[in-house]
């Protein structure tokens, strides 16, 4: 699973969402405060206008003050008092919302704010008239409700726009990073046998152009170094082959002398064994150099798969019989493979030889073939001790052996699987190894069907 904290797409999408959250949030706070100021200012202006109008009416008809019945309209409540401070009339329910004791005559002309029991804001304005004074109050509950509705809508808008910004940011980020994914796909196709490949982008973004150039320069240097290393490997193998052969001939000549002591003969026999191993290893290294050469052309022919497996089994039958091992071949007679018979036999020989060396007595080493719609599969299976998991990822590399304690005589130089892999790659195929401790190993060669 991708670690979102390390994902550029996630970071960019989160950045879009957070930026939107900040900007829209600040905008919503500003609009809410502005709307609140506007509503309060308009309400206070209405309160002052109502108070001034009421004072004018009372001054024009003072005899009506005691009998005036004032109804609440648009949240306006009125209390009319005479000179001594007695209530002449008031809006129904005003005594509950705006207690009389809360006001003093000296507060006339001052705009005050109070809170009703319900929590709503109430603005109160006191003003004198000829025979007394009047208190006018305005309930701001409608404005408070409008503000709450606006705030709720703002929060909803903030959530929706943030989610939308995250989705848009995700789409923009994925589209913007598409060239990187294209480069990654190209880089995956670069391997030691295809170092001549280069990263290519049509009209690359300005930010990626230097990266593409630097990577291509690194690939060019890597190709040069790898070519030199491969050439050195082949040259060293060629140069070593002659002196090793000369040493072997000289050792054979000395061994042919009749007056050698037993100790000398044992030493020379050990030298012959070492020289034989060196000669075999040099031959393997030369063959590997050939398989890694891009100019190598193999001679392909139409091969019967069952016949190929039977020819591979034949030279190992006596060895398997000595070890009490059964060699089994399972392949349909109609299967065909287009490849180089000599190279394929060499690859399968290496696998069968390795399987027999690690198979216990009484077990089976199987050579199997099967076809899928896209590939022809050749399997070599044994029932040996298996390969330690730590080595599975390194098999196929040169000089890698799961058990370093084996002698070179029994364990080889660690070039067998490298040769198999080189042969398979020459045929455009792939090598897969599966193994479990105590259950055995299966090596699968997969060849594309044409």
Image (cartoon, grey):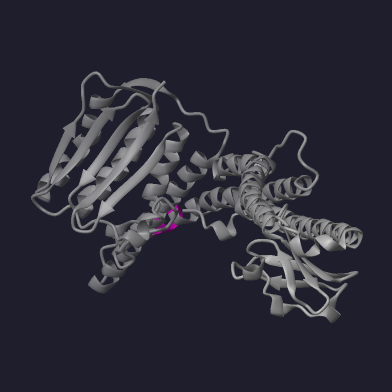
- Residue 197 visible in the picture: yes
- Residue 292 position in % (x across, y down): 52, 41
Is 278 on the left-hand or right-hand side of 4?
left
Q: Is residue 412 above or below residue 118?
A: above
Please identify the dominant SS of the magenta region.
Answer: helix
Residue at the farthest front position: 63
- Residue 401 visible in the picture: no
- Residue drawn at (64%, 55%) of the image: 11
Q: Is residue 100 above or below residue 284?
A: below
Q: Give the residues in magenta.
A: 245-250
- Residue drawn at (69%, 56%) of the image: 147
Residue placed most toward the observer, 2 or 267: 2
What number of labels is visible?
0
Residue 181 falls in image quadrant: top right
In the rendered structure, does residue 246 fall within the stretch colored magenta? yes
- Residue 330 position in % (x across, y down): 18, 31
């Amino acid at each position: 699973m991708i670690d979102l904290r390390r994902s550029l797409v996630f970071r960019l999408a989160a950045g879009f969402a957070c930026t939107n959250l900040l900007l829209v949030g600040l905008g919503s706070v500003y609009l809410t405060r502005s709307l609140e100021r506007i509503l309060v200012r308009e309400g206070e202006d209405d309160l002052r206008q109502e108070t001034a109008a009421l004072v004018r009416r009372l001054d024009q008809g003072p005899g009506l003050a005691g009998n005036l019945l004032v109804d609440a309209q648009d949240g306006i409540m009125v209390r009319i008092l005479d000179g001594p401070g007695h209530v002449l009339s008031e809006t129904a329910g005003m005594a509950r919302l705006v207690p009389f004791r809360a006001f003093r005559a000296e507060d006339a002309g001052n705009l005050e704010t109070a809170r009703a029991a319900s929590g709503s804001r109430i603005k109160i304005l006191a003003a004198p008239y000829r025979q007394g004074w009047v208190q006018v109050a305005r309930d701001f509950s409608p404005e408070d409700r409008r503000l709450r509705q606006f705030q709720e809508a703002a929060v909803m808008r903030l959530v929706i726009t943030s989610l939308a910004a995250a989705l848009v940011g995700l789409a923009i980020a994925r589209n913007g990073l598409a060239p990187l994914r294209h480069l990654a796909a190209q880089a995956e196709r670069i391997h030691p046998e295809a170092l001549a490949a280069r990263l290519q982008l049509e009209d690359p973004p300005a930010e990626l152009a230097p990266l593409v150039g630097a990577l291509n320069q690194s690939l060019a240097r890597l190709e040069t170094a790898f070519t030199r290393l491969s050439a050195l490997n082949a040259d060293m193998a060629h140069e070593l082959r002659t002196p090793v052969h000369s040493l072997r001939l000289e050792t054979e000549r000395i061994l042919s002398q009749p007056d050698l002591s037993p100790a000398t003969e044992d030493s020379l026999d050990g030298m012959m064994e070492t020289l034989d191993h060196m000669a075999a290893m040099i031959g393997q290294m030369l063959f590997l150099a050939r398989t890694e050469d891009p100019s190598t052309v193999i001679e392909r022919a139409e091969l019967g798969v069952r016949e190929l497996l039977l020819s591979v089994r034949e030279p190992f039958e006596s060895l398997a019989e000595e070890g009490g091992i059964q060699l089994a071949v399972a392949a349909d007679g109609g299967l065909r493979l287009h490849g180089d018979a000599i190279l394929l036999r060499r690859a399968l020989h290496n696998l069968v030889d390795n399987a027999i060396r690690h198979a216990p007595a009484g077990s089976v080493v199987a050579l199997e073939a099967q076809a899928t719609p896209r590939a022809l599969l050749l399997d070599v299976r044994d029932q040996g001790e298996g390969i330690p998991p730590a080595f599975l990822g390194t098999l196929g590399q040169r000089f890698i052996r799961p058990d370093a304690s084996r002698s070179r005589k029994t364990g080889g130089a660690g070039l067998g699987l490298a040769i198999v892999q080189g042969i398979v790659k020459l045929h455009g195929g792939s090598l897969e190894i599966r193994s479990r401790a105590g259950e055995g190993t299966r090596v699968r060669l997969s060849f594309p069907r044409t």
